[in-house]
Image: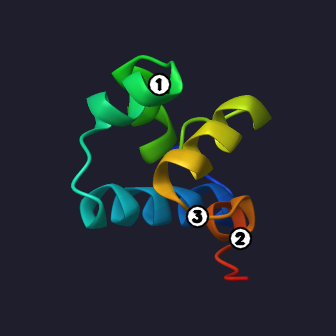
Amino acid sequence: MAKKHCNQTIGFAERLEQLLYDKNLSKKELGESIGVERKTVYSWLWGDTMPNSLYLARMCKVLKVSADYLLFGERG
């Protein structure tokens, strides 16, 4: 049976994937820059988990976006 994900998780994953593409960053590079393993980044992209606030903040800094954008798609 397929695992169900909340819309927030799916939207987050899609926005993260697009940002990685736009910034020409690999999953490994993002993981190294924020202090997590590549498999953790994949779990976020697959919608299995969400980053905690520490990694979300680091990710926002690296990707130069707000947490509101990553989490909810809202641009400031």
Q: Which residue is mark 1?
A: 40
- Seen at 71% across and 59% down, the residue is 67
Q: Amino acid at mark 3?
A: Val
The numbered mark at residue 54 is: none
Q: Which residue is mark 2?
A: 72
* 71 is higher (above) or lower (below) than 4: below
Q: Which residue is mark 3?
A: 65
Residues at marks 1 and 3, CA–CA distance in whole angstroms: 20 Å
> Which corner quadrant of the image does residue 14 belong to?
bottom left
Residues at marks 2 and 1, CA–CA distance in whole angstroms: 20 Å
Q: Secondary structure at mark 2?
A: helix
Dot placed on the residue nearer the N-terminal end, 3 or 2 = 3
Residue 44: x and y in percent read 51, 40
Seen from the viewer's position, the closer of residues 34 and 9 is 34
- Seen at 67% across and 82% down, the residue is 75
Q: Is 50 displayed left or right of 39 in the figure?
A: right
Q: Secondary structure at mark 1?
A: helix
* 38 is higher (above) or lower (below) than 21: above
Q: Amino acid at mark 2?
A: Phe
- Seen at 29% across and 60% down, the residue is 23
Seen from the viewer's position, the closer of residues 37 and 11 is 37
Q: Is 64 displayed left or right of 29 in the figure?
A: right
Which label sits in the foreground, 1 or 3?
3
Seen from the viewer's position, the closer of residues 11 and 6 is 11
